[in-house]
Image: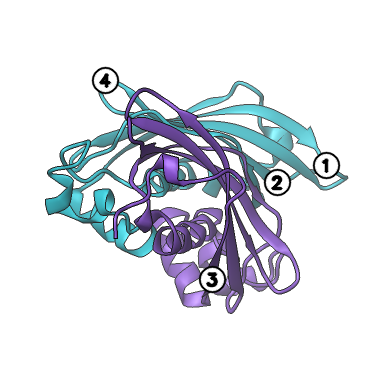
Chain colours: A cyan, B purple
Amino acid sequence: MALLRAEDLTIGLEIDLGSYTVTTDEIVAFARQWDPQSFHVDVEAAADSYFGEVIASGLHTLGVLQRLAVLGVYQHWDVIAGRRIRSIELTAPVTGGTTLTGTLVVEEITNRGPERALIAVRGRLHTADRPVLDAVFEMYLRRTA
Amino acid sequence: MALLRAEDLTIGLEIDLGSYTVTTDEIVAFARQWDPQSFHVDVEAAADSYFGEVIASGLHTLGVLQRLAVLGVYQHWDVIAGRRIRSIELTAPVTGGTTLTGTLVVEEITNRGPERALIAVRGRLHTADRPVLDAVFEMYLRRTA
């Protein structure tokens, strides 16, 4: 199947991304490497912390959204590269066992030169009862001149 | 040593974060898990791509900055949790062997209730000859009432 180019997308297109369940082991393993703060990596210390257990690094939560978006959407698009992530709102902590469900909406398509366009997509993750992450990603896609 | 609280910080405080060298193996391993786009994970396909080799996921580059910031700074601060990341600008690709050097600047300190403050810090990564990443992180710190 040919990859979708900028001209194949429409503003307002909304795509379900499916779900991903985060485990405590994954929270700790991710954070040991990239965000080794005690409330992410130290299960015992976190028991006495503000949240009562370890919470996922915001970068980990962002990684869950990106993984779902790549497998569900971007692998079918003719992406050149990411350019910018606009404000990333982290609205609730993610703890072990949390299932995150994602959606993606195409918000902007702007031509940039004869062969590429800048696409803005809003990605969201939520649990069964509340929003967790909201971010807008800008990326370059190929377009047909 | 006691952890620093919001009242111990000053706007304009700038801290060197040191350096981190990204390898091609790490670029591919990170992206396989969190951002499996071909230009991040497929070394052979990337040879024919826009950049000529695999480039790091923007999330991976953000992880490098966060790791440096935690080890150099945040582990000495009384952080409650991250709240938001403002616009993340990715201004140059990161390829295998690239050494990234970081700095952090405290930009805002705003009291939020009797026991915490919202802190905004700007983090930057650069190579020997150009900027790579610029992002502003907001996090809650404890403060003394």
Amino acid on which the number 2 mark rests in the picture: Tyr
Q: Is residue A8 above or below residue B113?
A: below
Q: Are marks 3 and 1 on the same chain?
A: no
Which one is in front, A135 or A52? A52
**Tag 3 secondary structure:** strand
Residue located at (66% from left, 26% from top) = A10
Q: Which mark is residue A140?
A: 2
Rounded to the nearest whole Å, what is the CA distance between mark 3 and mark 2?
Answer: 31 Å
Name the quadrant containing residue B129: bottom right
Direction bottom: furthest residue: B97
Q: Look at the picture and state if A42 lies above or below A120.
A: below
Point out the frontmost of discs 3 and 2. 3
Distance CA(mark 3)–CA(mark 1): 36 Å
Tell me the CA gap for discs 1 and 2. Answer: 9 Å
Count residues near mark 4 (Cα–Cα under 10 Å), then give few for <14, some for 14-19, many for 20+: few
Q: Secondary structure at mark 4?
A: loop
**Residue for point 42% across, 40% down:** B6
Q: Which mark is residue B18?
A: 3
Which chain's residue wears label 1?
A
